Image (tube, helix red, strand yellow):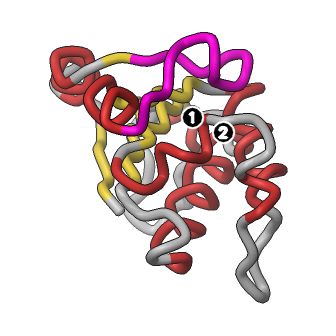
Amino acid sequence: MSTPPHAVRRLSDVARKLIVKTTAGADAPERCAQAFTVAATAVAAGAEVSLWLTGESSWFALPGRAAEFELPHSAPLPDLLAAVLAGGTVTLCTQCAARRDITPDDVIAGVRIAGAAVFVEETLIDGAQALVY
């Protein structure tokens, strides 16, 4: 039996992997907050989520850095990051980490460092959806 076109579809009916890549940090706070909010909301909705930290958002892979981020009327970045870490995957770009002298020993527990090959692999999975902020 098919779902009528006007019916509300549940996430479980269309489960897909969501890859959210953010290049923005404190330099573009609204884009940054949008990326984290979308990723955390998708985790809460039951989606398989992979959040990629690149460019200026790379700094949020370090302990305490998300707490320094402020944007009026936005959920606290540490809470959003914790939600994604609890139910999804958070990855720091290899090259972005190297340019900032960030090593695996420096990052928050649960954050992995990986490169373009892993990003491409994740985005090419059947049914995956990638968003870039």
Residue 47: percent from left, percent from top: 57, 34
| Vertical placement of residue 20 versus 122, above or below | below
Q: Type of residue at label 2?
A: Val
Residue at image position (35%, 56%) is: 23
> Main SS type for the magenta part?
loop
- Quadrant of the rendering where the N terminus is positioned: top left
Residue 98: percent from left, percent from top: 33, 27
| Residue nearest the viewer, comparing 99 with 15 | 99
Q: Residue furthest front?
A: 101
Residue at image position (20%, 16%) is: 121
- Label 2: which secondary element: helix
- Quadrant of the rendering where the C terminus is positioned: bottom left
Query: Circle 2 sits on which residue?
Result: 43
**Lateral position of residue 75 relative to residue 4, left or right:** right
Q: Type of residue at label 1?
A: Ala
Magenta span covers which residues? 100-113
Are circles 1 and 2 on residues that touch, CB within 8 Å?
Answer: yes
Residue neighbourhood size for the residue with mark 1, other residues' Cα within 10 Å, grouped as few (<14), some (14–19), many (≥20) = many
Residue at image position (49%, 38%) is: 51
Q: Label 1, label 2: how many angstroms apart (C-alpha)?
A: 5 Å
| Residue nearest the viewer, comparing 95 with 121 | 95
| Residue nearest the viewer, comparing 59 with 5 | 59
Residue 19: percent from left, percent from top: 38, 38
Query: Circle 1 sits on which residue?
Result: 47
